[in-house]
Amino acid sequence: MNLKSIITFSLATLSLIPLAPKMVMAQAVVSGASVHFIPDPISGNNFIQTISGSVSIPTGSFTGPTSIQPLVNSFSNINGSPTYDLLINPGGIDLTNPTSVTLNQQAADLLNASVGNISDVVSIIRANSNFLSNPSTAQAVATGSTTLSSPDGLIQSASAEYSLPIGLLFLGFDDGFNTGNCNGISGCIKITPFIDNLIAGDPSTPPVIQELTVDPGPVGLVNTPFDLATTAASILNGETNLSNIVSIIRAVSDANGVASPQVQARIAGAFTVQNQDGTTISTSGEIALPAGLYFATGDPGAGANVAFDCVQAGGLGCFSIIPELEQLAVGGLDFLNMTLLTINPGEVQPGDPSVGLNPGALNPASTDLNASAAFKIYENAGDINELSDLVSIIRAGAGTNSLTPESRPGARASGSSSIVLPNGATMSVNGEMTSSGSRYFQGGTPPSGSIIESLGYCNSSACLVIDPTITIETTDVNLSTIDELVIDPGIASTDAGWNFDAAAGYALSVAGTLQEQVSIIRAGGGLE
């Protein structure tokens, strides 16, 4: 039996795409794809598996040369024939060599060179307020997708995407075995589809995509100036002199409070099945965090929140989607209906800023001006001896309209499901939830008896669970309907938030005396 694919096509591109036209910003992007014809030992025909992926960095460039490597996955199979993973290696990352030189980039370099001279720092920050109100929107983005086409015409496809907040990047997949020459800050990304029979090991049930995992490696900090606002946040984060802190916060604030980035971490996933009779069922979802926060998978040794093939330890950007299907008989043909889609993003990082986090760690204070100013409040909150410092900081960032811009992105969860019937009729249902302020969704609960529940991935992960109820009329499929769509991102967090307004509110909540309370309220007097 030939266990290898008959034909393998591999494609690769290394390109620059403008992701933020208003900033004239270009980003380095590497992408690749492969196509495999996999023999089915039972039918004697071929399945077709396609895999693709891409990864971008917010600044700098990939060093090359680019390598696209299909990897045999013996744990994933089509009736015994192994399927493939895809490893994309851009050859490394050079953050010192930007893909384009902009005024914003040069201003950030100049600001970084002025550290230690507070007069120059403040002057440079104030020179162009547009760089604060419209900071860079360049994000690190990792994507992966796979398609499985059966000889009988059944087609399945899965895709997933993760965008990081500003100032962070994916360092690169590294399994510790130097697979594909991926080690250190490589920029590598690995796409792993897991395929097996609907009932594992039962060839009477069709092979299905049971999971898609995308692993771009650990999340790291961009340590090169590329954006004025991000560089100013880093300077403020490391400042300990009260006078300098107040001067910087005043310089980065306007009527709407302390400046804020407009991008946020988000993970999206989708799954589609096109049946032999032409019925197509799709389910998708997206979950986004408040500005500054990000997702990362914990230590695999810690337990079941880790998705399949997330093999590294701590701080990962690995994420996955898990579709669940049921097999029916419609018109004498095998038919797959979708019963559940789970997006497993990992855990929300970096945690509650009021519990003594290290301000130098990988947290929003390192890259997000609003969060950096907020952290200065947390450092002084609750201490009567620091009241004058606390009041000075709050007063410096209190705009006439609010402490935190109303446009600062908040948490969001959405889901949709659609069905296209053979007669052309279409039905779709969608919904969205948002959380106010700095609260984030802590993760949904999979339905009892579901596969994802048994796997335990969502025990400590902020899973988004999309649960459509789709009734398939087996005697006349054109009468099928979507009866309900449940979107479960979990309950909102109670952590103190990574924004200036939330920090001021926290300071008021822990104020121990009336003097402290009155002083804090007065300091924020610009509030509506």
Image (cartoon, grey):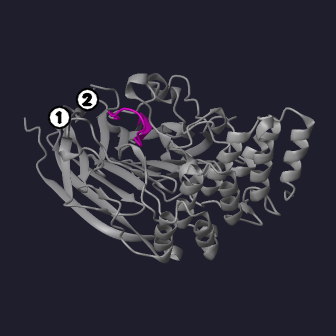
Looking at this view, is 372 or 499 the one in front? 372
22 lies above or below 170: below
Magenta-colored span: 310-328
On screen, residue 327 versus residue 527, left or right, reads left
- Name the amino acid, label 2: Pro
On screen, residue 88 versus residue 461, left or right, reads left
Looking at this view, is 135 or 109 the one in front? 109
Residue occupying image coordinates x 69% and y 39%: 496
Which residue is labeled 2 in the image?
Answer: 203
Q: From where the camera sits, is residue 136 visible? A: no
CA distance separating discs 1 and 2 = 8 Å
Q: Which mark is residue 295?
A: none
Q: Residues within 10 Å of mark 2 (few under 14, many from 20)?
A: some
On screen, residue 182 versus residue 493, left or right, reads left
188 lies above or below 256: above
Determine the image quadrant of residue 304: top left
Residue occupying image coordinates x 47% and y 24%: 456
SS state under label 2: loop
> In the rendered view of the protein, which quadrant contains the C terminus?
bottom right
Whether the residues at callouts 1 and 2 have beta carbons within 8 Å, the answer is yes
SS state under label 1: loop
